[in-house]
Image (cartoon, grey):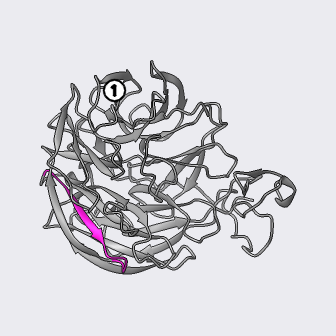
Amino acid sequence: MARLHLPLATLAVAASGCFDFGALPADGGGGDVAAATVTDLAVRDAPPPDLGAPPDLVAAPDLAASGLAGQACGLDAECTSGRCVGQRCAASTFALAPPISTNLALSASFIAAGDFSADGHLDAIVSAHGGGKMRVLLGDGTGHFAVGQDFPLGGQDVRTIVAADLDGDGWKDVAVVLNDAGTVTVGLGDGNGGFTGLSPYPVGENPSSVVAGDLDGDGHLDLAASITIGQAVAVLRGHGDGTFAMAIGIPLAVKPVGIVAGDWDGDGKLDLATCAPGSDTTTLLPGKGDGTFGSAVEVTVGHSPWNLAAGDWDGDGRSDLAVGNHDANSVSIVRGGAMPAVSATIDNVASPTWVATADLDLDGNLDLIVSGFEQTSAFTVLLGNGDGTFRAPRQFATGGRGGSVVAVGDWNGDGLPDLAFSNLDTNDVSVLLNVSR
């Protein structure tokens, strides 16, 4: 069986897309800004929409009460919803608590989740746009953070952060994409909220995203990065001690941005998939299980796909893809199999730039969380039906504004996946606790 790294930041398979923050003001300031991306996407600073108070934002429940969603169960009768799924009580209704904000005094661009302090409470790590550093945020188990250590990155801007145990010591490490330097930089966690060192690995010109997974079947996590200008995927094979071999490039016919790992063909070997906004395609690379890959398979999706997530949304045991088509305001579902193809398109999803997946209501079906970049203060949830289809899009307020990259994790320890957003313009991180019942 393929070993796929499922970081706590996603509870399923994370999507790591990319947007060119380098063209934005370092302090997240206002004004008309042209983001110099593959598609020359124009970003206009506009007031956030008045979302009002969504009826789905409710007070957090008493965690001591029995039978609530997320609590352990053995029988349906033990749950207030009447459904025990995977030894956890499923929810009757999906709901989120009002946002909990942590002021960072920096423009937070990317975010990832992990217990970096090894205290049993989920933490987060964010990158500072224009600041050339990343910062650890220490969780207290209630959805609040204390500001931890900063880690300089030589003045380089971060494109993506992935948290994973790269050296097998049980502590979370990070892999950081530094676009201008053309590297994936690895920091090994010390279990105290810090990192023992930052080691850069050259991968090629203009890397955008990175994903972790055991691509060669040796039991050690490897890394794969999308190389946009270089039109390639770079594979860094892990030695199991936090170090990696020299990158091996896989040429592509397109300029990839987002990258994820999954088993699309169900052969037990990890595959890779990227998306390319300039060509309206997603490219699948079938893994051979030894760190090498077969011929690329291209699937046409919607206009300007910036980001994608992997998960089994139809329950057939094979990974599928959810691709955020930024300019089309839609999400394409690419069903896995011998001949991957778009099986559904979900419209009316505002400017999808980041895509993540988790079973938000614990009904056994993976759901989607989609956030946009256009200086908005909202995101979209798509609850899965388990057959490859989704319920109508539902919009929620992030509690911040600008960028709003999403991470998923259980920040209050109640067994339900919560959501955290890095907010570029409001210089904060907001956590929305999952209070489904």
Residue 414 is situated, as x and y percent measured from the top left of the image, at 65, 68
Residue 297 among magenta residues? no
Q: Is residue 233 above or below residue 87?
A: above
- Name the element at disc 1: loop
Residue 381 appears in view: yes
Q: Is residue 374 above or below residue 60?
A: above
Mark 1: which amino acid? Asp
Residue 185 is situated, as x and y percent measured from the top left of the image, at 20, 59
- Taking the image as shown, residue 118 lies to the left or right of residue 433, namely left
Residue 19 appears in view: no
For this orientation, the residue located farthest to the right is 77
Between 75 and 147, the one nearer to me in the picture: 75
- The residue to which callout 1 is attached is 280
Q: Quadrant of the C terminus?
A: bottom right
Between 215 and 84, the one nearer to me in the picture: 215
Q: Quadrant of residue 74?
A: bottom right
Name the residue at 51% across, 75% down.
Answer: 121
- Taking the image as shown, residue 70 lies to the left or right of residue 350, namely right
Residue 357 is situated, as x and y percent measured from the top left of the image, at 52, 47
For this orientation, the residue located farthest to the front is 218
Name the residue at 55% across, 37% down.
Answer: 312
Question: Could you tell me how many numbered marks the image carries?
Answer: 1
Between 200 and 39, the one nearer to me in the picture: 200
Name the residue at 29% across, 24% down.
Answer: 296
Query: Which segment is the magenta one?
Result: 182-193
Residue 236 is situated, as x and y percent measured from the top left of the image, at 22, 47
Give the class, few, some or many, for how many residues have Cα within 10 Å of label 1's Cα (few <14, many ≥20): some
Q: Is residue 294 above or below residue 159?
A: above
For this orientation, the residue located farthest to the top is 339
Residue 184 among magenta residues? yes
